Image (cartoon, grey):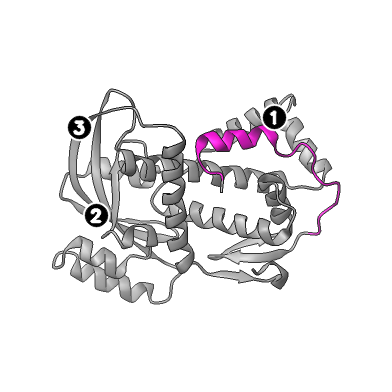
Amino acid sequence: MRILLSAFFLLLMTVFLALSEEKLLDKVVLVVNGKPVLKSEIELAKEWYGVKSDREAAEKLIDQIILAQAAEKVGIHATPTEVDNAILRLARMNRLSGVEEFKKRLEEKGLVFSLFKDLIKREIIISKFVHIYLKRNLFEGIEEGKAVSLRKIRLIYLDKNKPGFGEKYEMLKKLLDKEPFDKLAKEYSDDPVTAGKGGLLGEVKKGDLVKTLDKPIWEHKVGDIFEIDTDKGVYFLKIESEEKKIVHQEPTGEEVNKKLQKEVELYLKKLKENAVVEYIDKSLEG
């Protein structure tokens, strides 16, 4: 999966120049952790990843969706402006006048522009996830020579769509002031990325996360444990520590990229062990 920012924008230079003329009959062919995937999304994935097989495209799309879902659970997001700017860069790289002309080109080929925007949004979210968590944790760098306030955060995430949510929520509420937070995270959290690490999200600075999480994290004080209720689930967050760091330039190069790619593969493997993928179209099942 091409998820690093540099690889992402290389992809933008080359894809969608020769889209299939075939009009697509849309139908749900997959469901990934509750998210329906349409036939047209498989066709988009074939062009995006440069593969010919529907099965291979489905596998890559599944990986992308699972990673993006995990990133969103820990507060990573992509704004509409970021998505629009990425598409505008793609249009200009392909010598198109702008987003509207690019949209027209897609629609002429029977492809859905909104689905393409979703795909780009997931790529941006994954790229941020790699930078904010994996790269920072591996190489302890954010921006060269800048003093930054960082807060070390742990979280417990309860998925409202999972059976037994209510009972688990009530039990956890009773235990929060009696048991260590990291122990409870390992036992109760529905987020496979952080649960095994005792809920450790890592060090974040202001603006790293979605406003729903970012604002209260910086309004509370060190040591606080608090709850955030969202449509999809409930977060229990603990601010473990805060410190200012003068961070240095992140290392670059082939060895760094290889190390990051290996880290991503390990994360993805763990996520897939807990993922629920339903193959409506059995021919896509590997």
Please provide percent x and percent y for residue 55.
Answer: 69, 62
Q: Nearer the viewer, residue 114 or 58?
A: 58
Residue with the mark numbered 1: 91
Residue that mark 3 sits on: 244
- Is residue 22 inside the magenta stretch? yes
Of mark 3 and mark 2, the one earlier in the sequence is 2
Sort mark 1 into few (<14), some (14-19) or many (20+) by Cα contacts within 10 Å. many
Determine which residue is flagged by label 2.
226
- Residue 259 placement, left or right of 151: right
Q: Between disc 1 and disc 3, whose residue precedes?
A: 1
The residue shown at (66%, 47%) is: 49
**Secondary structure beneath disc 2?**
strand
Please report the residue visible at 40 percent of the width from the left and 61 percent of the height from the top. 233
Amino acid type of the residue that numbered disc 3 sits on in the rendered structure: Lys
The secondary structure type at the circle numbered 3 is strand
Residue 72, numbered label: none
Q: Amino acid at mark 2?
A: Phe
Query: For the magenta stretch, what is the residue range?
Result: 2-25
Q: Tell which tag, 2 or 1, sits nearer the viewer.
A: 1
Residue at 74%, 24% (x, y): give it: 97
Q: Position of residue 24 (x, y in %)?
A: 81, 55
User: Residue at coordinates 68% horizontally, 51% vertically from top-left?
Assistant: 45
Q: Are marks 1 and 3 in contact (CB under 8 Å)?
A: no
Q: Cα distance, mark 3 to mark 2?
A: 23 Å
Q: Secondary structure at mark 1?
A: helix
